[in-house]
Amino acid sequence: MHELSEAALDTPSAALFFAMLAESRRPLIYAGGGVINGNAASALTEFATTFGVPVVTTLMGIGALDTTHALSLRMLGMHGAAFANYAVDDCDFLIAVGARFDDRVAGVPAKFAGNARHIAHLDVDRAEVNKVKRAHWSHVGLLAGALRTLTAHGRQIKFQARLQRLDGRGRRAEARLCHELRPRESADPAVLRHRGAQTATRAVKPSSPPASGSTRCGRHSTATSPHQGCG
C-alpha cells in the first residue's frame, strides 16, 4: 500500500496522456470496480465532467458516475446496455480506470474497442496492465490521486477537448433504448419485472434515501443491474 501511495503520476506522464486526449474526438472512460473499491468515484466524476468524457461502467463499477448524469452511458458488456457497447466500439481513445477487461466485458479482446487508436489504463494492480489489451499509456497507483493529478494538469494547461458525439448517444443506439432498458412488462398487473420492481420501490417514498435491494445470483443480478439508477 505504501508503494502505491508513493507512485505519484508525474508531469511528463500527464502531458503524454493529454497529448493522446488532444488527438481524440471520441474518448470514453471505462470504469470498473476498482473505482468503487479505491474510493475514486468523486475524482473520476470530476475528471469526466471537467473534460466532457462519457463513462461506461462494469457491473462492479456502477456508481462510479451517477447513472442519471448526462455523461453516463451505463453498464457495458454482455449483460449491459446496447448503446454502452456501441460507444466502446465507436470510441477512438479508451480510458480504462480500475477495470480488467474480463470476458463478460471484452468478449473477444481483439475486437473490443476495435476503433480505438489509443488505450490508457489506470490500475492499482500492475498485473492487470497489458494482460488482455495492450495499453499505450498506463499508470499503476492509487486511482483517486492519479485522476486528481490529471484533472489538475488539464486545468493548468487550459486543455480544451474537441469532442464528437459518440455513437452510444446517437440515433442508432437510441433506437434500441426502449428494448434494452424498458423491457415489456407482464400482462399480469400483480407481476413486476426487473425495471418495474426497481422503479416502484423508489416511488414509494422518493424523498427518502435511495432504497436498497438484493437479488439471487446469476441471471437475477445481471438482469437487474442495467436498470440501477433508472427513474
Image (cartoon, grey):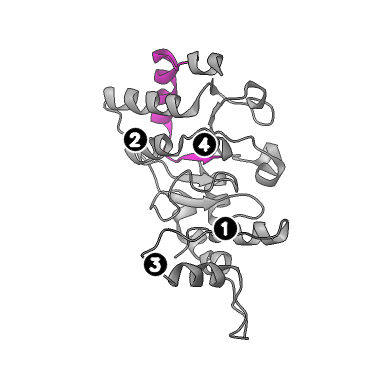
Residue annotated with mark 1:
226
Mark 3 or 1, closer to the camera: 3
Q: CA distance from mark 2 to mark 1?
A: 29 Å
- The reply to whether callout 3 and callout 2 are in contact (CB within 8 Å) is no
Residue 4 versus residue 39 in the image, above or below: above
- Whichever of callouts 3 and 1 sits on the residue coming sooner in the sequence is 3
Q: Earlier in the sequence, mark 3 or mark 2?
A: 2
**Residue that numbered label 4 is attached to:** 35
Magenta highlight on residue 62:
no
> Which residue occupies 53% across, 67% down?
198
Which quarter of the picture shows residue 207?
bottom left
Q: Which residue is mark 2?
A: 161
Q: Residue at x 32, y 25 (%)?
A: 152
Q: Please provide percent x and percent y for residue 213.
A: 57, 60
Name the residue tied to disc 3: 206
Mark 2 or 1: in front is 1
The answer to whether the residues at label 4 and label 2 have Cβ atoms under 8 Å apart is no
Q: Amino acid at mark 1?
A: Pro
Counting from the top left corner in percent of width and height, residue 188 is at 63, 86
Q: CA distance from mark 3 to mark 2?
A: 37 Å
Front of the two marks 3 and 2:
3
